[in-house]
């Protein structure tokens, strides 16, 4: 790819428009107490082929001046580069924010809840999609889209309701992290496809990758980060940390694993060192202030608006599956872990939100050619609909379940006393 000053400026203009609109709409949704990411996706829809993209490249005159609107493709190769970096930074930040020490003593509960919240939605989503005539590949993507709970949305909801540091709150947070990891691994297996031998080889490669790079993280990474701290240059430590993330992502990709696993692993390792507090704010400035909104703009731009017209009943079914699947699966897992019924239901409801990983799952499946044509547009439209619906419905449902045990007690007392 050869860049000239003219097309660099056109790319810069595309990025500028995307950031301005994404920030503006994100701000509006934040004021409405909804995730800003919904506004960023909407910005992509408005800038895509069914919005301002319709008039890009047009020529007209103003006071005898010929004006040609720049041709901007928000799904093209140039802008996709920024979107790809946005995914990596999103997973890197997710890893940085995981404090493994918080989950000590909660491993069993978090694991059981996560497993239940993976199996039930995956099976129900796959079965529902097959019944609507989707292929097994598309059905698997839809099932995987329902697997991972949004850590960001969940944390914000738990904090607003002041239950983040309760037993159910920590179980929800731990399970949300675990099902993210499970979802990423399952997505990787889907992308490789092929025979049993191919899948076995991938499993071996994945295990080898984790063993090698976790060992490097424990034994070597601290020294590298220490060196970065000693270099007396502005933000040298930040630069080395990002370089580590990109190296981890590259070797994950070269190992046959999707690069987002490498970014997530690098973030988790660095996030549990003494250096994490020194870079997290700077990484968020680059990620949340620049690259991550561009990823969600790209997601919105890839949506074919007409696809929403063809997914009506199907989207409604998948939303129901997304809600019921998490409540049932996670509640059963919580009960197996020894939690009370009221707390188990509360955990199940708290695991409902889907957002980042659902959108990543759909977009990665599309970019890797697993989904193509109209099916790709339908799956992406369904994914966006599910993320919005599950995000909106969780806070009111969680408020109800918080008082569920007290309601049962009152009914019990009135009945027998």
Image (tube, rainbow, N blue to C red):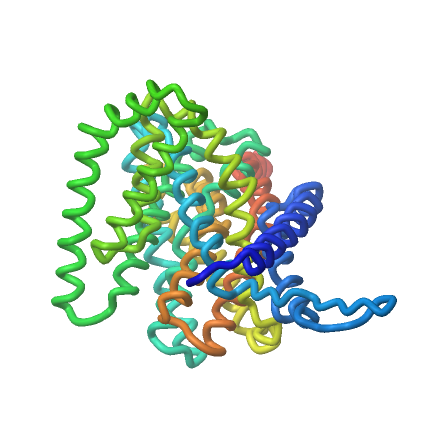
User: Where's the N terminus, which quadrant?
Assistant: bottom left
| Foreground of the two, 58 or 224 | 58
User: Where's the C terminus, which quadrant?
Assistant: top right
Q: Is residue 69 visible?
A: yes
Q: Among all residues in the image, which is located at the extreme right?
A: 63
| Foreground of the two, 329 or 103 | 103
Q: Relative to residue 236, is residue 118 depicted above or below?
A: below
How far across and down, in percent of the image, does residue 297 sit? 57, 56
Q: Residue at x 49, y 78 (%)?
A: 374
Residue 295 shown left or right of residue 340 in the figure? right
Residue 416 found in image quarter: top right
How far across and down, in percent of the image, does residue 198 sit? 16, 66
Q: Residue at x 46, y 27 (%)?
A: 165
How far across and down, in percent of the image, does residue 319 sit? 52, 62
How far across and down, in percent of the image, does residue 216 sit? 19, 34
Q: Relative to residue 368, is residue 270 depicted above or below?
A: above
Residue 95 found in image quarter: top left
Residue 253 shown left or right of residue 47 in the figure? left
Q: How many marks?
A: 0
Q: Residue at x 53, y 56 (%)?
A: 387
Q: Relative to residue 401, is residue 296 depicted above or below?
A: below
Q: Is residue 416 visible?
A: no
Q: Residue at x 65, y 65 (%)?
A: 70
């Amino acid at each position: 790819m050869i860049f000239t000053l003219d097309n660099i400026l056109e790319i810069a203009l595309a990025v500028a428009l995307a950031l301005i609109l994404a920030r503006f709409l994100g701000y509006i949704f934040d004021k409405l107490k909804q995730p800003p990411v919904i506004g960023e996706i909407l910005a992509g829809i408005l800038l895509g082929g069914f919005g301002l993209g319709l008039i890009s490249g047009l020529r007209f005159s103003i006071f005898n001046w010929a004006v040609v609107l720049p041709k901007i493709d928000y799904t093209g190769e140039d802008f996709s580069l920024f979107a790809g970096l946005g995914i990596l930074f999103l997973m890197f930040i997710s890893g940085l924010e995981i404090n493994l020490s918080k989950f000590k003593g909660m491993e069993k509960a978090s694991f059981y809840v996560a497993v239940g919240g993976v199996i039930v939605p995956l099976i129900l989503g796959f079965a529902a999609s097959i019944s609507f005539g989707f292929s097994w590949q598309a059905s698997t993507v839809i099932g995987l889209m329902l697997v991972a709970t949004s850590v960001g949305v969940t944390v914000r909801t738990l904090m607003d309701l002041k239950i983040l540091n309760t037993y159910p709150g920590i179980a929800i947070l731990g399970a949300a992290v675990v099902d993210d990891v499970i979802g990423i691994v399952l997505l990787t297996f889907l992308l490789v496809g092929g025979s049993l031998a191919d899948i076995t080889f991938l499993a071996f490669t994945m295990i080898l990758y984790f063993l090698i790079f976790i060992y490097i993280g424990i034994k070597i990474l601290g020294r590298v980060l220490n060196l970065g701290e000693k270099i007396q240059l502005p933000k040298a430590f930040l630069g080395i940390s990002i370089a580590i993330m990109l190296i981890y992502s590259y070797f994950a990709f070269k190992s046959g694993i999707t690069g987002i696993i490498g970014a997530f692993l690098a973030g988790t390792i660095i996030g549990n060192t003494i250096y994490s507090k020194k870079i997290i704010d700077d990484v968020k400035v680059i990620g949340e202030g620049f690259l991550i909104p561009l990823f969600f703009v790209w997601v919105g731009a890839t949506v074919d608006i007409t696809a929403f017209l063809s997914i009506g009943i199907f989207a409604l079914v998948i939303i129901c599956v997304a809600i019921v699947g998490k409540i049932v699966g996670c509640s059963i897992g919580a009960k197996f872990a020894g939690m009370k019924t009221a707390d188990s239901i509360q955990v199940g409801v708290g695991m409902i939100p889907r957002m980042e990983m659902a959108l990543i799952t759909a977009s990665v499946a599309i970019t890797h050619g697993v989904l193509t044509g109209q099916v790709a547009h339908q799956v992406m439209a369904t994914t966006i609909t599910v993320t919005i619906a599950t995000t909106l419905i969780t806070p009111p449902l969680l408020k109800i379940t918080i008082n569920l045990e007290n309601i049962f007690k009152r009914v019990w007392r009135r009945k027998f006393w």
